[in-house]
Image: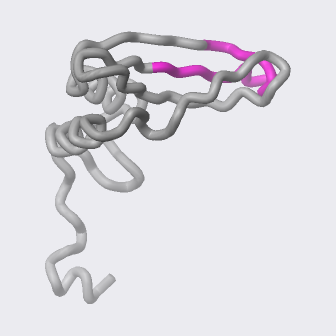
Amino acid sequence: MQERQEMGIWPHPPLLFKDLLNELVKYLDTNKWFPHEWVERRNGEIIDDVAVIEKIDDKKFIYRSRSHNPRDITILATKAEETFTSAAKAAEYYLKNVLHLPGNLDKWKVVD
């Protein structure tokens, strides 16, 4: 840690929300799914808490999420789907509503 401090790379500077947004938009330009492909689940199966973005085309992005019942992970508690007309709108929604940014991202500070 001391070596990092001497090099001026610790503590690291905060990340900018707009930079994360731009990176996610770039990712969605060339990938169909973020962060991974959606796998449909039904009651009786293990329900994972998950949120994804699917790129249908350059003007249609679908955000999907689901969560399980806190008392039984084989029961679906919530499921949501929302359509966006741009990668930027879908990415912003994901960063703000799934990752709760600006804020902390795995011990990195994210600021406006």
- Magenta segment boundaries in residue numbering: 64-78
Residue 56: x and y, percent? 36, 20
Residue 45: x and y, percent? 81, 26
Q: Residue at x 42, y 34 (%)?
A: 33
Left or right placement of residue 54 versus residue 37 in this view: left
Left or right placement of residue 94 versus residue 21 in this view: right
- The residue lying toward the viewer, choosing from 63 and 30, is 30
Q: Which is the main secondary structure of the residues drawn in magenta?
A: strand
Looking at the image, residue 60 lies above or below residue 94: above
Direction right: furthest residue? 44
Looking at the image, residue 75 lies above or below residue 34: above
Left or right placement of residue 41 versus residue 36 in this view: right
Q: Residue at x 17, y 60 (%)?
A: 13
Is residue 69 on the magenta stretch?
yes
Is residue 27 on the magenta stretch?
no
- The residue lying toward the viewer, choosing from 31 and 1, is 31
Q: Residue at x 65, y 22 (%)?
A: 40
Quadrant in which the C terminus appears: top left
Residue 73: x and y, percent? 78, 27
Looking at the image, residue 33 lies above or below residue 57: below
Residue 18: x and y, percent? 15, 38
Q: Quadrant of residue 70?
A: top right
